[in-house]
Image: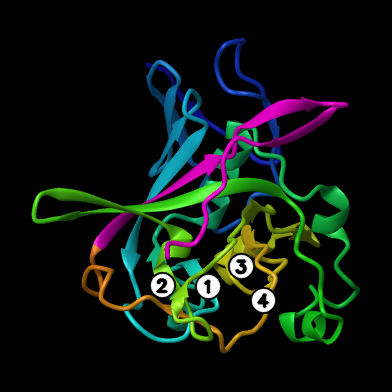
Amino acid sequence: MGVLKIGIPLAIAFAAGCLPAAELPPQPPETAPPSIREVGIGEWTVGAIRLSKTRRMVSLPAKVKLTDGLLEYVLVHKTGKTHESMFSTDVPPYHLQVAMLLLGAKGAGPDVLTNAPPGGPISNAELMEYKPKPVPGEEVEISIRWQSNGTNVVHHMQDLVMNKKTGKPMANARWVFSGSMVWEGAFIAQIEGSIMSIITDISAMFNSHHPERDRDSLWFVRENVLPADGSAVTIEINLVNKIETGAGKSRPLKKHDEKK
């Protein structure tokens, strides 16, 4: 199978029948570009990430970081806000961005990604003053897998996030690939380590669209479900398939409701 090393910035175009072209953000100078290797029909690796074109999915290794307590994030890089996140990963956010773009994910679009104010990206504290709208992006489904006594355990991400007010897992959860942003030539997710956020975070690569996402005292780890702190897990990210419904509109094939 072929191996491809990429240089950044660069538009990557694969031959027909392989991966789609992708316009990549600037490469952080301290982050080596991932090697991209074809490992099967429609299957690729992007560094430590597995990409399946046929299943419209990427997966990456992570570890359990919190088994109880308050949450603002569900996945961060090991250099990010690990004290507020359920999982952490060694995978550079930039590598995940490359994989998502090669999968064909759209993200939020260039205006949202680059319109940071002079002096630095807007902070979440500043965002909260304006009761921010959800960060736009392409809808995804996020699942977590791990092994327990030889059994493959699978949960949707929202099943592992507890709503303190209702005492139940997160309801009506929607996650989107927003793609973080570029400011003064820097990919902010790589700098801050923010990957998957419950609260509105324009620096994060994935954001929640839950109506109460910014109630930062509401969301907790669902206890007695996760394996021990430090346990290995696999995070799977699927683009949500759509079907045509007429008049140029589309709707998701399926959505996940809260487990009762």
Residue 28 is at least partly visible in this image:
no
Looking at the rendered structure, which numbered label has been put on residue 212?
4
Q: What is the C-alpha distance between the residues marked 3 and 2?
A: 19 Å
Q: Is residue 180 left or right of residue 153?
A: right
What is the C-alpha distance between the residues marked 4 and 2? 18 Å
Q: Which residues are magenta?
A: 232-260
Q: Are marks 1 and 4 in contact (CB under 8 Å)?
A: no
**Against 202, is 131 above or below?**
below
Residue kind at label 3, given as amino acid type: Ile
- Dot 1 amino acid type: Tyr
Please determine whether, in this image, residue 123 is positioned above or below residue 201.
below
Given contact means CB atoms under 8 Å apart, are the residues at marks 1 and 2 in contact? yes
Report if the CB atoms under discs 4 and 2 are less than 8 Å apart.
no
Q: What is the spatial separation of the Cα atoms under label 1 and label 4, in whole angstroms?
A: 14 Å
- Judge whether residue 245 is colored magenta: yes
The picture places residue 96, in percent across and down from the top left corner, at: 53, 48
Of circles 3 and 2, which is in front?
Answer: 2
Task: Give the structural element (helix, strand or loop) at label 4.
Answer: loop
